């Protein structure tokens, strides 16, 4: 199945809130300046099937996430928001004291892919003013897995990773390492 890439919603800019570390902003600005080249290279790399690629990217993931603290960024929560499975809706509805239908009506709309929901409005309503998640322990699976650098067969989704490098400083650094090695 072909992976759909969600673009930034109209009106959402990549200006960062004051709590985001300046170094993270710099990383994202550099990534934005290389956007076309990165997209081209990632599209090219995604056509191959390199042995050990997932393990290499997982190693980069571990290395980079020792440097990058997601809770000091939160840019994905402002610019993308998660995809919610029915299970995520049930868990967060219970956390918020709502029924799943009430939760969906208040916060969500159907995604293009009918099996999922997305947020009606951004930023994510569970993003606190300091960039932390008010329901971090119960966050949706897509939040937990973002930027999808530990996914199986990550090489087939390098275009998505290239796009995520415009949102996530960790993804941007992982993309730099991939492009330097391959």
Image (cartoon, helix red, strand yellow):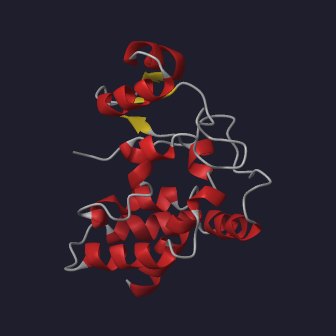
Q: Position of residue 174 (x, y in %)?
A: 47, 73
Q: Residue at x 42, y 72 (%)?
A: 61
Does residue 120 appear anywhere in the picture?
yes
Q: Is residue 91 above or below residue 4?
A: above
Q: Quadrant of residue 92?
A: top left
Q: Is residue 55 above or below residue 171?
A: below
Please name the residue shown 24% across and 63% down the image: 153
Q: Which quarter of the image is occupied by the C terminus?
A: bottom left
The N terminus - image quarter: top left
- Farthest residue, direction right: 18
Instruction: Check the image and name the residue furthest to the bottom.
Output: 181
Position of 12 compared to 82: left or right?
A: right
Give above or below for 100 relative to 138.
above
Residue at position x 43%, y 54% in the image: 146
Residue 20 in percent (x, y) is at: 72, 58
| Residue 93, position as x, y percentages in the image | 43, 24
């Amino acid at each position: 199945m072909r992976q759909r890439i969600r673009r930034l919603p109209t009106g959402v800019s990549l200006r960062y809130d004051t709590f985001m570390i300046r170094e993270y902003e710099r990383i994202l600005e550099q990534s934005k300046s290389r956007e076309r080249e990165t997209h081209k290279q990632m599209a090219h790399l995604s056509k191959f099937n390199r042995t050990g690629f997932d393990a290499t990217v997982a190693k980069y993931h571990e290395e980079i996430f020792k440097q990058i603290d997601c809770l000091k960024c939160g840019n994905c929560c402002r610019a993308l928001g998660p995809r919610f499975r029915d299970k995520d809706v049930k868990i967060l509805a219970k956390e918020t004291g709502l029924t799943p239908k009430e939760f969906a009506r208040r916060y969500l709309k159907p995604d293009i892919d009918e099996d999922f929901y997305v947020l009606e409005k951004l930023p994510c309503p569970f993003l606190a003013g300091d960039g932390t998640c008010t329901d971090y322990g119960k966050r949706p699976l897509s939040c937990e897995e973002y930027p999808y650098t530990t996914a199986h067969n990550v090489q087939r989704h390098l275009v998505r990773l290239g796009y995520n490098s415009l949102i996530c400083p960790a993804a941007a650094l992982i993309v730099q390492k991939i492009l330097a090695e391959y």
